[in-house]
Image (cartoon, rainbow, N blue to C red):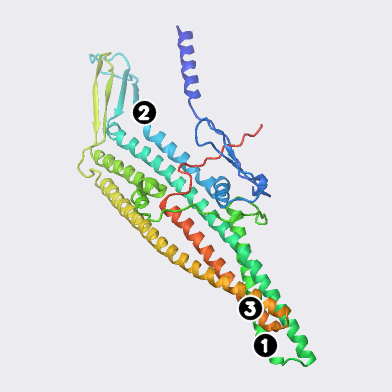
Amino acid sequence: MMRRWRTYGSLAVALMLAGCASYRPEPLAKAPNLAPDMAALDRTIPAAKAKGPPFRISVNQALAVGQVGLLAVLNDPGLKSERGELGLAKAQLINASLLPNPSLGLGFAALIYGPPGAGASTPSYAASLSQDITSLITYHARVAAARAELRSVNARLLWNEWQVAQDARLLATQIYYANIQIRDRAREFKLLSDELVAVREAAASGSLDLTAEAPLAQAKANASTALATAKLAQLKNWQKLDALMGLEPSVRFEIRKPVIPPLPASPGALLATLPSRRPDLVALQLGYAAQENRVRAAILGQFPALSLGPAGGTDTSNILSIGPTLTMDLPIFNQNQGGIAAARATREVLHAQYQAELDKAAGMVSGLSARIAVIRKDIRSASADAKTATLAAKDAEEAYAQGNLDQRSLVDYQTTALARELELVALRTSLDSDQLALAIELGVGLPQTRIVPQPKVTKS
């Protein structure tokens, strides 16, 4: 019999140990993990459907602005760290779903002395088993809150992915148009440099007054400053984009001309459904639902702590007794007033925060729509002016070739045409940037589900 009980005891201990978590160290990295080139990036987008094939972005050709955004989502170091928040929310749901363990009490008192005739002859034993009832009362509200919080975190992470993709698309758009600006500014600088050399030669030969050099020198200095400023801004944009994509700061790649998906002429219909489509607003709604359940749990928690269970034992006269045991707090000083007040105050904060974000979104949509309409009008006017200036520059070149126009006047026509072109490029950059911003404010143009990269399998 003793051998059988030992076997049962060993088996019970083994089962308890099997259910315990084990410790495994996870050392920190000792070196940065930035990709040295585009080929080293994670470029596989998981399938939207369960059985569908994944899509792999090719980097052997110029990338569209949308592809740049997707690559940033897949490789942004910040998003990789934020994805751990989902694991934490899952752990909190598991913790809220677990029922509290019952409490077991055991007691033993050895018989030392008893007066004659008292009937004391054996040691006394006591045992009790109790369960926390109050935690069972608040169980469903706590689980509902944790489940809503998990969904809120998931929606918030999707919004963060949208923000990263939006930043990458905007940077790619600005880099594309900045390349055109730098090219035009370099042409302007060369024109002014060549003209300044010609003026200096003419002044040295005595055929031109020296005072003609001063305005050209000033114009060349201004052009040089503008070119240097454009190159520095371009360098900063490349470094920002490389950082978003997890690349080394020196990596460069070709970007295609931005093609912005058409937006509705009237965003009213999309604005009406915005709370059900935009991830940040959905996350706030779910966070508010979680807080509603926390308020409910706090109100249920005003009931006093209550434990119930059986208890029994033997006394020194070997009399066995058993019966229920009830333990509870007396709600004299604390009825969870503080917890209820804090939960309600937090709910009010979340209520106001959601309304503020909804109002802000509506205001941004209206403001961007109005600004886009103005920029489109300005582009039509600037396009006409640029076309006129370009034609005038071509006529000036023909007149110069025939000897009917001096070089200084020719340069003026050419620099005027370049200035008009630069103005048009700046307006197009603003238009595409505002259209991208309006798209994300309306909750369109990006994946409606999170892009979770497949874990890399390492051989041990």
Residue lying at 70% horizontally and 87% vertically, measured from the top left: 213
Please say whether residue 331 is visible from this viewpoint: yes
Q: Earlier in the sequence, mark 2 or mark 1?
A: 2
Mark-to-mark CA distance, 2 and 3: 87 Å
Give the camera-side residue of 131 and 368. 368
> CB of mark 3 within 8 Å of CB of mark 1?
no
Regarding mark 1 in the picture, which secondary structure is present there? helix
Residue at left 48%, top 69%?
378
- The image shows residue 329, relative to residue 347, as above or below, that is above
Answer left or right for 270 relative to 247: left
Crowding at label 3, few (<14), some or many (≥20) Cα neighbours within 10 Å? Answer: many
Q: Which residue corresponds to mark 1?
A: 214
Q: What residue type is labelled 2?
A: Asn
Residue 202, position in %: x, y? 76, 88
The tag on residue 413 is 3
What mark, if any, has residue 107 been given in the picture?
none
In front: mark 2 or mark 3? 3
Q: Mark 2 points at which residue?
A: 101
- State the image coordinates of residue 62 (x, y, percent, origin top left): 64, 51
Q: Where is residue 421 in the image (x, y as percent from the top left)?
A: 59, 70
First along the sequence among labels 3 and 1: 1
Q: How many labels does the image show?
A: 3
Residue kind at label 3, given as amino acid type: Tyr
